[in-house]
Image (cartoon, rainbow, N blue to C red):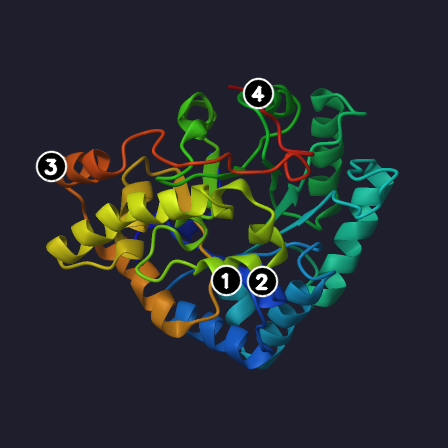
Amino acid sequence: MKMTVLGKDGPAVSQFGIGAMSFAGIYGDATEADSHAVLDACREACVTHIDTANGYGSGRSEEITGAWFKARAGARDEMILATKAGITGKADRQFNNDPDYLEAELDGSLARLGTDHVDLFYIHRYDRSHTPEELGGTLKRIIETGKARAVGLSEVAPSTLRRVASECPVAAVQSEYSLSTRFPELGLVQTCAELGTALVAFSPVGRAFLTDAPFSYDRAQSMTFTANNPRFMEPNYTANIAATDRFRALGREMGEPAAALAIAWLIAQGDHVIPIPGTKDLGHLKELIRGTQLSLAQADLDRIEAVLPVGWAHGDRYNAAQWEGPERYC
């Protein structure tokens, strides 16, 4: 397993993590047994990073992860554990970065996870009622409590990252980044590298488009997020399947699963880039982990770029409601 560091002076961590949102049934039902089997397989493969959040299934993902730690002696000490808070679920105030609120939410996460600290605590969405400098001060105080070893941000602009980092070291920024979503290359990838901040890439296989088994249209329509997402709505869905068929064909030509190529491509973008795919299927997990074992030559990267050039995707990555919270910067 390829290793990197989490933040400028942070701990060693696998350059691949497991995103635990799937454990909460976001993309279809997931049992605790299936989720624990995925975590067991990750542990066996020396994956040392687990990423969850209090908002995934209203704490369900954290509960499942905590139960796994409780049942596996020594597992907590082996893992770099991350969680997030800041999304309230309330219409009158969707995002809250108030100091007392964040610490109370972190306390709830620690109880569900069965631990006295997390290794990384993210602000899930930036609350613009606070300046970035104020948020940096809040995060610094959270580290001082000992409840989080390091802190991070999610879906923020490079300028916000710089301003928060002026008050508190930011170990990681989480952002959607893949062959289908490449806007982070317009400043975030570079700023993270400059500051020594890890760029944790969620949805690294394009919400299944960059795999050998993309969601069927009917399945996409059965799930809340994809049913309302522009890339899964017609005529975009059909156009995106046609575009990614070329990528699947390239994978077959290279003798590798499409998902493995997508993961390997991300890892090739920099030692500070950490993909965190989510899955509840052991076969798919094997394909994803295979990507960490590949070393793509420049010729391989050129072939991938030729079949999926920048801007190939049809439709925005979010609809208007899904864009509430993430910062646009390009």
Q: Point out residue 165 in the picture as x, y percentages from the top left corner.
A: 60, 25
Near mark 1 (Cα within 10 A), the count class, few <14, some 14-19 or many ≥20, is few
Near mark 3 (Cα within 10 A), the count class, few <14, some 14-19 or many ≥20, is few
Between the residue at mark 2 and the residue at mark 1, the CA separation in whole angstroms equals: 6 Å
For mark 4, what is the residue? Answer: 162
At label 3, the amino acid type is Ala
Dividing the picture into quarters, in which one does residue 305 lie? top left
Q: Is residue 177 left or right of residue 301?
A: right
Q: Quadrant of the N terminus?
A: bottom left
Which of pointers 1 and 3 indicates the residue nearer the eye?
1
Between the residue at mark 4 and the residue at mark 2, the CA separation in whole angstroms equals: 40 Å
For mark 1, what is the residue? Answer: 218
At label 4, the amino acid type is Arg
Say which label, 3 or 2, has the lower sequence index.
Answer: 2
Which of pointers 4 and 3 indicates the residue nearer the eye?
3
Say which label, 4 or 3, has the lower sequence index.
Answer: 4
Say which label, 4 or 1, has the lower sequence index.
Answer: 4
Between the residue at mark 4 and the residue at mark 3, the CA separation in whole angstroms equals: 35 Å
For mark 3, what is the residue? Answer: 299
Residue drawn at 55 percent across, 62 percent down? 27
Say which label, 1 or 3, has the lower sequence index.
Answer: 1
At label 1, the amino acid type is Asp
Between the residue at mark 4 and the residue at mark 1, the CA separation in whole angstroms equals: 42 Å
Is 20 in front, or is 115?
A: 20
- 26 shown above or below 153: below
Which of pointers 4 and 2 indicates the residue nearer the eye?
2
Circles 2 and 1 in contact, beta carbons < 8 Å: yes
Residue 222: mark: 2
Residue 165: mark: none
At label 2, the amino acid type is Ser
Q: Point out residue 130 in the picture as x, y percentages from the top left corner.
A: 79, 25
Query: Could you say whether the residue bearing mark 2 is in a helix, strand or loop?
Result: loop
